[in-house]
Amino acid sequence: MATQHDLPTRSMTQGTGGSDDDAIPSEDTSEVTRLFNERLTAWKHAVSYLEDYIHATEKMQHAHGKEYEKVLKTVSHPLKEGHHFDQSVGGIAGMFDNIRSNTQGISNSHYETAKVLKGSVLPIFERLHSEIKNKTKELIKGAGKGSKAVDKARNATQKHIELLGQHTATYDSAGGRLTASDDPYILRRNAMHHLHKQVLEENNNRQDFLSVQNSFAQFEAHIVSTIQTGMGHFSQAVSSQQDQTRTMYGDMASTTQRISPDFEWNGFLKRNGNVLIDPSAPARDVSNISFPNMDHPSTQPLIAGSLEKKSKLRGYNTFYYVVTPAKFLHEFKTDDDVREPSPETSLFLPDCSIGALDGQKFNVKGKDVSGGKLSAKFGLSHELVFKAHTLQDAQRWYDVIRASAGQTTMEVPDSSAPSSPVADRKSGAFESEAGSSTAAGSQGYGAGQGDGGLDDKAGSRGQGGESGERYGGSYAAPGSGVERQPGQY
């Protein structure tokens, strides 16, 4: 009697639970490889950032070197008017030499730092970058290859398990009529054979991943250590450059501070002693100075001294008069040629007439040719009445003026007022060329008052009583026949 069998069923060829008891695990063997590959890529990018940073710093240092060369050009030329500065050490010229030297040193330090960064620091990170890339290739070729072998073995096992399931179902339905190669027993043996190979590949791959995982810890420690080494060299190079710059700037400042405040001035005095003023030398004195024609005979007065001139309103005023060899009678306010180099009034005696001597008085008629504003405006003749301090002075003045005058008359000075066109116009009685003193007297002027002609320019000099005290007499040049009295001009 035939045995009753249950309906044939096909077992699931791959579990969905993903446990280690499944013949074909659900895990992706390439997932670990991708994770490690992604981590290596992260490290590679981190190192690449550092490479870019070092490279940019190197370019910056090189650019700074060029910029400092531009700074150096501002002081590279010799100082203008450099001969004014002492060229020895310790002065302004030495300070500029120090600035040039240190600025060139700063520029060179930037160039040297750029070379160190490019030649020593940057290669550290470049080599580390290459190691990471090689590690990535090693991961792909090693662990990646094992993953592919595991996947291949799993596919083979899966194929035989499915074939076993197919023929076990056929066996149940056909009553056991199968070929020898389709015998489920044989198929099971083949499935077990491939399963053994699969597990072997999985275990080998697992061991490879464990080795890679353990080596990654060491490799990352190497990466960190290399980065630390590179950054240490970078910091040392940059810090050294900064220390050199600080030192050189400090040297500039200290060299400047060591300059003595009077160093340049003392050197300037020493170099230009023949030009500068000697403070110990005495001041110049006019009395010790001479110039060409200073003592020429034409510059020596025939007579010089004080005379009283009759004024219109205030009687007689005292002025300083000189008769020159050029036959001029000059009137000055004082005898000080520093304060008053030009005369107030000048008469050219050959064009003038002199009256008779009346005691201490005499008069002179003529035009003012001094070139003053009044003389240029009116150009009129004036009669000037003079009074000497003594009879002897009067005789001396009279003799000298008469020798140069163009005409001598017997007119005597009027006791009231001198004849002048200005006074005549004011009185309304303009008379003859000789002049009349009656018109001036009719105006009510008292004795000792009258019009002094151009003496108004000189202003009031006080009453006649003070005239002798101011000037103290006359001075006559040699050959004039008039001698100078003691205490006189």
Image (cartoon, rainbow, N blue to C red):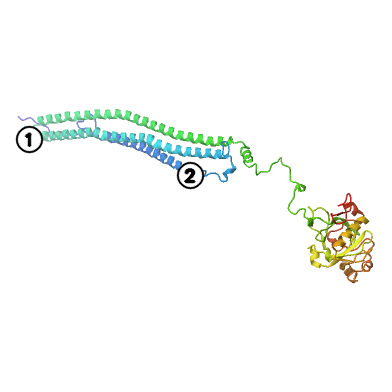
**Image position of 483 (left or right of 166):** right
Give the quadrant of the N terminus: top left
Q: Residue at x 79, y 67 (%)?
A: 377
Mark 2 vs mark 1: in front:
2
Please report contact status of discs 2 and 1: CB closer than 8 Å, yes or no.
Answer: no
* Three-letter amino acid code at the position of disc 2: Lys
Image height of 162 relative to 478, above or below? above
Residue placed most toward the observer, 394 or 32: 394
Question: Tag 2's secondary structure?
Answer: helix
Residue placed most toward the observer, 184 or 432: 432
Q: Residue at x 59, y 41 (%)?
A: 85
Q: Looking at the picture, how far across and down is residue 67, in whole percent?
A: 47, 43
Residue placed most toward the observer, 39 or 65: 65
Q: Looking at the picture, how far across and down is residue 206, in whole percent?
A: 24, 29
**Image position of 187 (left or right of 376):** left
- Can the viewer see residue 12? no
Image height of 11 relative to 322, above or below? above
Counting residues from the N terminus, which is met first, the one under dot 2 or under dot 1? Answer: 2
Q: Which residue is mark 1?
A: 174
Image height of 214 relative to 434, above or below? above
* Three-letter amino acid code at the position of disc 1: Ala
**Image position of 284 (left or right of 426):** left
Question: Tag 1's secondary structure?
Answer: helix
Q: Looking at the picture, how far across and down is residue 63, in whole percent?
A: 44, 42
- Can the viewer see residue 148? yes
Instruction: State the mark number for residue 394.
Output: none
- Gap between marks 2 and 1, in whole Å? 101 Å
Instruction: State the mark number for residue 70.
Output: 2
Q: Looking at the picture, how far across and down is residue 324, in whole percent?
A: 82, 58
